[in-house]
Structure formats: C-alpha cells, structure tokens
Amino acid sequence: MGFKVGLLGLGTVGAGTVQILQTPDQRHPLLTELEIHKVGVRSLSKARDVSVPSSILTTDLASIVNDPEIDIIVEVMGGIEPARELILTAIANGKHIVTANKALIAKHSDEIFSAAEKHGVYVLLEAAVGGGIPVIEPLKQSLCSNRIQSVMGIINGTTNYILTRMVNEGAEFADVLADAQRLGYAEADPTADVDGGDAADKISILAALAFGGRVDRSQVSCEGIREVGRSEIAYAEKLGFVIKLLGIAERSDSAPNTLAVRVHPTLLPKSHPLANVNDVYNAILVEGDPVGQVMFFGRGAGAGPTASAVTADLLNIAALLKVGRDCAKQADGTPLLDPLLACAYRQEFAIAPLETLESKFYARFLTQDLPGVIGKLGTCFGDHHVSLESIVQADKRDGLAEIVVVTHVVKEGDFRSALAEIEQMNVLSSIASVLRVLPT
Ligand SMILES: NC(=O)c1ccc[n+]([C@@H]2O[C@H](COP(=O)([O-])OP(=O)(O)OC[C@H]3O[C@@H](n4cnc5c(N)ncnc54)[C@H](OP(=O)(O)O)[C@@H]3O)[C@@H](O)[C@H]2O)c1
C-alpha cells in the first residue's frame, strides 16, 4: 500500500523534495511507498529543476487539498494566504500536513494545531526552523523528558553570512548586503532577514515547542543587524567578543508562565559554542535539566537541506499510517494522535517585557574631549544601579572622544533610564551604538 502526497509548491524546497522522492536508492525504503499524486504551482509553463508529469501539475490548489485520494499535503508554497486557508481545508478533510512555512506557523499555529487536534491529523514542521537541521523533532521527542531552561540560536543564514563577511573583510553592512544580494545569498527585499523578522518567527516556534505553550509572535521583540557597523565589529573583536544575531527564548524568573523571547544582535564571548558558527550555517543551543547543553548545527536553508527535513516528516507520517497508528480512536471517534509527534499546547505563555530582562550591555559614546567625561558617565550609570565591568576611552574620532562601556548584568529598564539621562548631557555628541552582551 502506498501513500499519496499532494505538493503545494514546486520552487526551491518543492523541487528538492521531489528530487529525494524520485531517487530513493540507499535512502529509507519507506520512501518508495510515497507517491506524488498532484503538484500545485502558479505557472504551468515555468521551467523546473525537476521533471514531473504534466498530468499531475495544476494551478488549482484547492483541487489538491480536496482530493479524497491524497493522504498527506506538503505545503512548500510559502506566504500566509492562500497557504493558511489551503492547510485548514486539508486538515478538515482529514489530511496530514508537512510544512516548511515558518511565517505561517509563527502567526497561526494556534488555529492550525487546534484544527489538527480536532480532526486527528499531524502537522509536522521540521523544515520551518533551521532548514536541514533536525531540531523540532528532537525538541518534541528526544529531549521531552527535560525541563528546558533556554533555547538560543543563530537561525537566519543571511544575517550570519553578512556578519561573518563584515568580520573577515572589515566591510560595512550596506556593502556586504549589496554583494550578498548580487550572489543570491540575500533576497532583493532583505527586510525579513536583516530586520530580524524571520529569526523572530523561528524563535517563537522553537519557544512554543520547547516550553510546550502558546507564544504570541506579535509580543516577541525583534532587532536586526542594520545598526551593526564596522566599528562595533572591530570593538567586539578587541574586547574578545563576536557579534551574532541571536534568537533567544528562556524561562523568566520574574513571573510564572512567562518567557523571555527576543531577537537581537548580541556580543558573544569568543569561547561560546555559537561564536564559531559562520557563513550561512545555523546552530541552535538547547539547555535542559538534566541533559545540560545540546547543540544542533547545519545548513539552515537550501533545496537539499530543507527537503531532507520535509521528507523526514513525510516518512514519520507514512510510518504511522503504515503500522495503523492512525486507526486508534478516542471515545468521540477522532483518531488518537501520537502525543510526542502531535503539536499540542499545554498552556499560554506571557512574554516578559524587555525592560524587565537582565543582560550585560555594550555602549559606544561620542563626547566632547574634556576631562571628567568618563567620571560623569560612570556616576550617571551608578545612579541608575548600572555597574560597569569596563569603561575605556578609545581613539579620537572627528575631534570627539570615543568611550566604550561594558556593563555587568543589569536590568534593561535601569540601563535605558541611565542612557536617557546621558542623552541630556551637554558633553555628549551621540550614543553611537548600544548592543547586548551575552553573560558568561
Ligand atoms: N528556500 C529555502 O531554503 C527554505 C528554507 C526553509 C524554509 N523555507 C520555506 O519553504 C517555503 C517554500 O520556499 P521556497 O524557497 O521553496 O519558495 P519558492 O522557491 O518561491 O517556491 C514557491 C512555490 O510555490 C508556488 N506558489 C506560491 N504561491 C502560489 C499560489 N498562490 N498558487 C500556486 N502556487 C504558488 C510557486 O509556483 P511557481 O513555481 O509556479 O511560481 C513555487 O513553485 C516557504 O515557506 C519558505 O519560508 C524555504
């Protein structure tokens, strides 16, 4: 008995998926039982990276999700609509879903997972975070007996590529971005990557699965890398750090059922496990009790890696169908789902406001070159309960003194109050940069 797959999309990931399904040799034998029944696209005449019979290509995607013969829908078309509507229809028709669509899952997981639970189908999304890196299923299954304390990672390949080149070449952000666009490593519209939205979608998904609850994506604060200049890269290097765009999710001590979830450029000590993850590579560091630190590393995007994750999800579902695990029924007749594979939220999480979080900070000030300025800055920080780990006057820049400060771990609200007061000082020319530093 074979399982019929309906594919929504035949772009980068869709073609990669077809490529794996069409070349099962030396892969898992269950692959041979998966049959591509229909493929939905926008254009029937477009040249494709893989060859599929024209008889199964269609622009009528509703006909795929309503096809009674199809068991599993693979959504690799991207975007919110019509992907959301098509997935919900497929679920209502009792079809299992595999999706790579992080934007959709980050914003609509509640609706989609609830519908899946109601109709007794699986929604698997390994490809939505970290491309080819297996991290979603390990979080749901292999690490599920742990109390997860934190999940943090480099989860956007484009920004990691840009930051790596800025370090290696001493280049400015805008120049590297333009070159990355020319080389195809960054989109023509790079907003979702460089402003952190893509990473925020992914850390919201990781947080929800790691901590087992609903995370409101709209509450997740997100700062990108546009403000990271060559000077910050150089100062970070001198101070023993490297700058990475991190998605971070951790339990908050301040209130029950509260998580601290955010995305921002971060100074990492060079000895940190994530500090040497470079170029387009992604890595996710999970800390749990009692397992300790576990790190997942690999390619976060691309046809092959992402299709590897999509087909693993397909095989997971096919394996359950094969052994008839979908036949067990609850009292109301709904199929009984494997509790480790199904995505179900156990609670609702609040997101802690940034000003309540604790962090170390790096700040660079340009001030008049007068005696006593360092003392004034130090006093102002002290008045706001911000203790300093180091304060150094660097070279002069355009006739102004450049002062670089690194704080101890302080409350963000206190640090921001100190900055607000410093902004009023008449010796200040500008606050050139403020970045968070990961405590060791
Ligand atoms: N690319 C990656 O490395 C990567 C990595 C991880 C996750 N993802 C996620 O995977 C999904 C797919 O990404 P991708 O890079 O494969 O996208 P893509 O190359 O742009 O392919 C999208 C495919 O969907 C079809 N499509 C889109 N909207 C459609 C519509 N309204 N009606 C019919 N067909 C439609 C397109 O048809 P035509 O070909 O006819 O235009 C195309 O075949 C996205 O959610 C993305 O975030 C991608």
Image (spheres, rainbow, N blue to C red):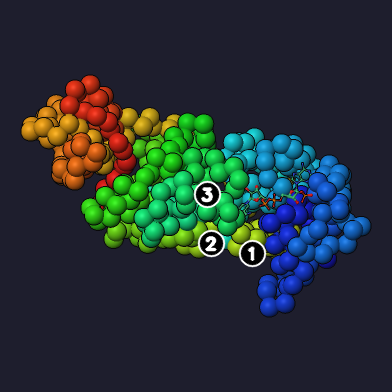
Q: Amino acid at mark 1?
A: Gly
Residue 75: % across, % down: 71, 49
Mark 2 or 3: in front is 3
Residue 333: % across, % down: 75, 43
Local SS, label 3: helix
In the rendering, which numbered label is found on residue 304?
1
> Residue, x 40% and y 53% (percent of image)?
171
* Cα–Cα gap, marks 1 and 3: 26 Å
Judge whether 202 appears above or below 136 on screen: above
Residue count near mark 1 (Cα–Cα under 10 Å), binned few <14, some 14–19, many ≥20: some
Q: Amino acid at mark 2?
A: Arg
Report which quarter residue 17 is drawn in.
bottom right
- The disc, 1 or 2, on the residue closer to the chain's N-terminal end is 2
The answer to whether mark 1 and mark 2 are in CB contact below 8 A is yes
Local SS, label 1: helix
Give whichever of 329, 248 is nearer the camera: 248
